[in-house]
Amino acid sequence: MQKMAHLFPGQGIQKVGMGKYFSRTVENLLMAEDPKLLEVAWVGPQEELNKTINAQPTITLMQVSLAEDLDKPDLAVGHSLGEYAALWEAGVWNLQSLYKVVKARGYYMQELCPDGWLIALRDRESADFVVNAFKGRVFYSNINSQRQVLVGGIIEDLPAVEATLKEERIAYKRIQGNKPFHTPYLEKASKAFYEFLLTVEGKDPEFDVYLNIADDVVTNYGEIVKLLAESLAKPVDWTRTVAFLESRNFDILVEINLEPLLAKLTGQKVVLVHELATL
């Protein structure tokens, strides 16, 4: 039997029309719990779907719909938000609990984080320069690859940061959104989310799930809760996840998504979920 891992991407892939990929089980859940979100997932508007409190459950529920009939993998991993669908697949939460968890995560990240920004830079050297130049104000957010590193900060620092980047002739790109996710600016959100997670019943994973912040598989639900809350205020280093996948020598990596995203950041052959039938 081939050794397989499932990869779940995070926030940023939301698009109006995602509702058409929802399974009947997911549609029934939303008709009971959040019919407005079901409408937004189908017809938008995009600005409403982009709100973190809506984007996070919509993405996660689409991933559930794509994965619910698949054979269980040997390992599941996720990029930021994607870790929640990975944990659901491993039996940590039932669907209703998963929905409540990601809805709460989206709420705390949206409401308990100051307005800010994220900037993508082409290498670690450029990111190190900005973080050191604005020490204690600008922080790492995502290390997606050696050629895509995100840093973030609060809105009042943006003019000075952009001026410095231009002066130093460092190429950069503003990322969609107005919050400095995965930086210390989410400490308040992290603490509130932890208190919420303590109220949610969950189980130990049925198979291996790798959490980026732990840089290892996690086996205990209590530890999972602690790590998930902490990760809101700490950077995601996808290069560590890639290294872990390489160390496990998988035969097949499957991205649970409609289009390749993590496949472009992984450096290994990754198939999309709809391509499994052709293998």
Image (spheres, rainbow, N blue to C red):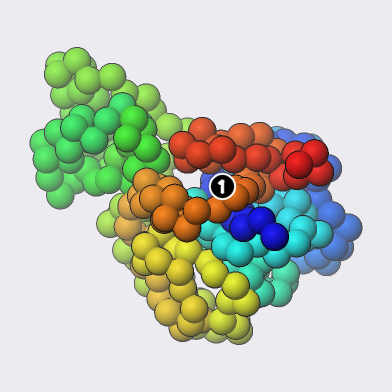
User: Can residue 47 be seen in the rendering of this structure?
Assistant: no
Q: Position of residue 218 (x, y in %)?
A: 46, 73
Q: Is residue 192 above or below residue 128?
A: below
Front-most of residues 54 and 130:
130
User: Can residue 132 be seen in the rendering of this structure?
Assistant: yes
Q: Classify residue 272 as left or right of residue 249.
A: right
Amino acid type shown at disc 1: Pro
Q: Quadrant of the C terminus?
A: top right
**Residue sitting at the far front:** 1
Q: Secondary structure at mark 1?
A: loop
Q: Is residue 47 above or below residue 232?
A: above
Question: Within 10 Å of the Cα at label 1, are there few (<14), some (14-19), or many (20+) other Cα atoms?
Answer: many
Q: Classify residue 57 as left or right of residue 204.
A: right
Front-most of residues 189 and 56:
56
Q: Which residue is located at x 19 percent, y 45 percent?
A: 137
Q: Position of residue 17 (x, y in %)?
A: 77, 37
Q: Classify residue 57 as left or right of residue 239.
A: right
Front-most of residues 74 and 103:
74
Q: Position of residue 54 (x, y in %)?
A: 63, 51
Quarter assignment of residue 187:
bottom left
Quarter assignment of residue 20:
top right
Front-most of residues 51 and 7:
7
Q: Position of residue 139 (x, y in %)?
A: 24, 46
| Count of numbered tags | 1
Q: Is residue 202 above or below residue 268?
A: below
Q: Quadrant of the N terminus?
A: bottom right
Identify residue for label 1: 9
Quarter assignment of residue 199:
bottom right
Q: Which residue is located at x 14 percent, y 18 percent?
A: 168
Q: Which residue is located at x 59 percent, y 40 percent?
A: 270
Q: Which residue is located at x 24 percent, y 25 percent?
A: 162
